[in-house]
Image: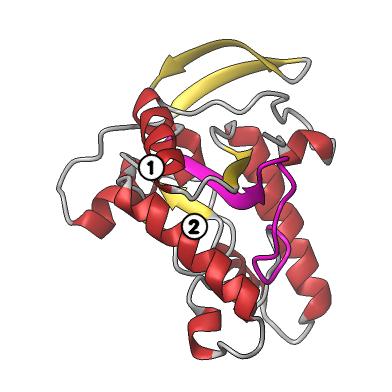
Amino acid sequence: MEPIYYQQQIPDSLRVIYVREGVYERLQQALTLLPQEYCLLLYDGYRPFQVQQYLFSHFSQQLAKRMPQLTPQEIVQATKKYVAFPSKDVAYLAPHLTGGAIDVTLADVHGKALDLGTAFDEMNEKSATRYFEQHTQENPFACQHRRLLYNCMTLAGFTNYGEEWWHYDYGNVAWARRVQTQVAQYGAVHATIQNHNVKEFRFL
């Protein structure tokens, strides 16, 4: 477990990764499906609203510097490809606000992250889960690792966000949309954060 945003010293980030019970159970199941020489490395789970706001603003600024020709509206749309808009609206709830989204990679038995073709949170076309399916010769190891991660996670009941090989959902609005069910199991969680720990929380 590597709480990535805490390591990056982002304000109000959590030093511990929290997930819903159903997510935890399915992660355990995914682990049993992996060959013995692999394990899962978690980067993020439940994300406080203020961290979601920070990330959206941060990524927007990065994209604006990289692509100064884009209008503010285009920057927002481009950012939404990689970071969910910090919305508490039930129909458009940012997945990590529910505790039903996780960012995860494949690691060796010592917990060292393996090559999956891009860095976590990298904003380019190679981050798309199926990128190496169309470019198999570019990085065969990354292609193999992504397939392994995808297969064990989806067999355990998760769905993947296609633009990010590391992002998986269970029980939230994004998951419900992909499995075509009307009702999400998990809504938003509001947490009060103190010294990078959850002081108190409530389900919205």
Neighbour tally class for label 2: few under 14, some 14-19, many 20 plus, Cα within 10 Å? many
- For residue 17, which numbered disc appears in the image? none
Query: Splitting the image into 4 quarters, where does residue 156 fall?
Result: top left
Q: Is 109 one of the magenta-colored residues?
A: yes
Q: Whole-percent x and y of residue 100? A: 41, 37
Residue occupied by mark 2: 149
Type of amino acid under label 1: Asp
Q: Nearer the viewer, residue 130 or 73?
A: 130
Under circle 2, the secondary element is: helix
| Residue lying at 48% horizontally and 77% vertically, measured from the top left | 130
Cα separation, mark 1 vs mark 2, equals: 31 Å
Who's the residue at 67% across and 79% down the image?
71
Name the amino acid type tagged 2: Leu
Q: Where is residue 26 shown, x and y percent of the image?
A: 37, 36
Is any atom of residue 88 visible in this view? no
Please report contact status of discs 1 and 2: CB closer than 8 Å, yes or no. no
Tell how many labels: 2
- Foreground label between 1 and 2: 2
